Amino acid sequence: MKHALVVFALALLTACGAPSQGASSSAGSSAQTPGAKIEISNPWALATPGGVTTAAGYLTIVNHGADADTLLGVDSPRANSVDVHNMIMQDGMMAMRPAGALVIPPGGTLTLAPGGLHLMFNGITAPFAEGDTIAVTLHFDHGGDVSVNLPVRRAAP
C-alpha cells in the first residue's frame, strides 16, 4: 500500500509538473453555457491507485462573451472538495498552492494543464480508474454553472 502511494505521488507530480505537448482533438467532451458564452473543452482526469485521497483534473475554458467572467469554484460528487491549484517553484522545490477565483477575459482562454493550473480533487470517494468519467460542475460569476465530464486516463492525451 505504501509503495502504491509513493508511485502515485510521483505520477501526480510528474503529470502536474510536465507541460502537456500539443492539443488533442479527441480529448473528451465539450460543454457550453446557454448562449455559448463559456465553453469547456479537452477535459480529462488522471487515474489514481487505490488508497489515495487526491486526484488531478484538466480542461480548457474559453470565454466567448463580451465581458470578463470569473471561475468562482468547482465541485464534484466524486470528491469532498475540488480546488483549482497552481504549480509553483518555491525555494527550489515544486509546490502546489490554491489559485482562488480566476478571471477569464472576454475572448480569452484559461487552460488547466499539467505543469500549471489544475483541478485538485480532495477526499475522493473512490479511485479514479481509467475509463471512468468524473462529473464536475464549474461555477462562474456570469456564466452560471457548467457541468462537464472528465474522462479518466493514465497520462496526458
Image (cartoon, rainbow, N blue to C red):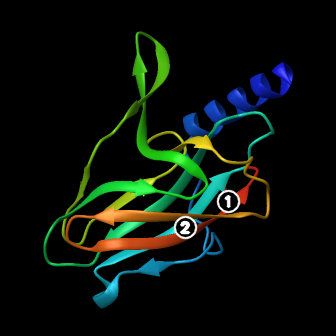
- Across and down, in percent, residue 26 comes to 66, 74
Extreme residue toward the left, this view? 67
Figure quadrant of the C terminus: bottom right
Q: Are marks 1 and 2 in contact (CB under 8 Å)?
A: yes
The residue carrying pointer 1 sits among few (fewer than 14), some (14 to 19) or many (20 or more) residues within 10 Å by Cα, namely some
As drawn, 83 above or below 143: above
Residue at x 19% of width, y 63% of height? 105
Residue at numbered disc 1: 157
Q: Earlier in the sequence, mark 1 or mark 2?
A: 2
- Across and down, in percent, residue 115 comes to 51, 39
Residue at x 20% of width, y 71% of height? 142
As drawn, 149 above or below 87: below
- Using the numbered discs, state the Cα–Cα distance from disc 1 to disc 2 in whole angstroms: 9 Å
Residue at numbered disc 2: 42
Residue at x 37% of width, y 35% of height? 98
The kind of residue on which mark 1 rests is: Pro
Q: Is 1 placed left or right of 39 in the picture?
A: right
Figure quadrant of the N terminus: top right
Q: Secondary structure at mark 1?
A: loop
Q: Is residue 119 visible?
A: no
Q: How many marks?
A: 2
